[in-house]
Image: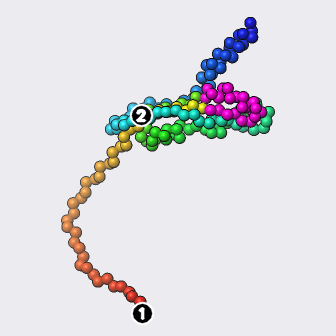
Amino acid sequence: MSQRLGLAITTALVLSGCTALTRQVLVEDKQPPPPNSTTISHCSGSEWQDNSMMAIVPIPIIGLGMPTQEINEIKADDVLAKCGPADRLVNKKVEVDRTACVPTVLTRVISFGVWQWCPADVSWSADVIQPAPPPQPAARLERGPVELQPERDVLSYRPSQ
């Protein structure tokens, strides 16, 4: 009976993917666009990225008990750069799903705790706004007619031959 309970708990954790631990929202910015701008498009997508980790003390076997550090850190600015310049993006959201990292913990065991492969599903969305209009030029001051100076002879030097 206790084996079935343990198996049921393990199965529930694996199937749920431990979503509290495997999903991370890097940025969620729900700003309305500026009043004088227009939303011209919506940008969204997802892709798999390598989010591997390495033990802070990368010594075999000892590394099994050490905390890890990301080798390929996923940054929201780099992901959102696919949509355009940062000053033209509103309603931004970047989420990293590391559910696939749960079964790949075997790579950490094989490397004796030194390294773990972690494929992460990165998804993003943002609204792209029209660039701000250029500032209006200041009114030009009217000046009177410009007087041209009389032409002057230009002296030139030619070396003798």
Q: Residue furthest bottom?
A: 161
The numbered dot on residue 161 is 1
The one of 142 and 12 positioned closer to us in this rendering: 12
Is residue 26 among the parts visible in the rendering? no
Image check: 103 left or right of 140?
right
Secondary element at image label 2 = strand
Q: Which residue is mark 2?
A: 42
**Which quadrant would the C terminus be assigned to in this image?**
bottom left
Q: Residues within 10 Å of mark 1 (few under 14, many from 20)?
A: few
The one of 78 and 141 positioned closer to us in this rendering: 78
Number of numbered discs on residues: 2
Secondary element at image label 1 = loop
The one of 43 and 75 positioned closer to us in this rendering: 43
Q: In the rendered image of this protein, does residue 15 appear above or below residue 156? A: above
Q: Are marks 2 and 1 in contact (CB under 8 Å)?
A: no
At which x and y percent is residue 35? 34, 36
Does the magenta run of residues contain 122? no
Q: Residue at x 49, y 33 (%)?
A: 45
Q: In the rendered image of this protein, does residue 85 appear above or below residue 155? A: above
Q: Residue at x 67, y 34 (%)?
A: 117
Q: In the rendered image of this protein, does residue 10 appear above or below residue 70? A: above
The numbered dot on residue 7 is none
Which span of residues is magenta-colored? 98-119
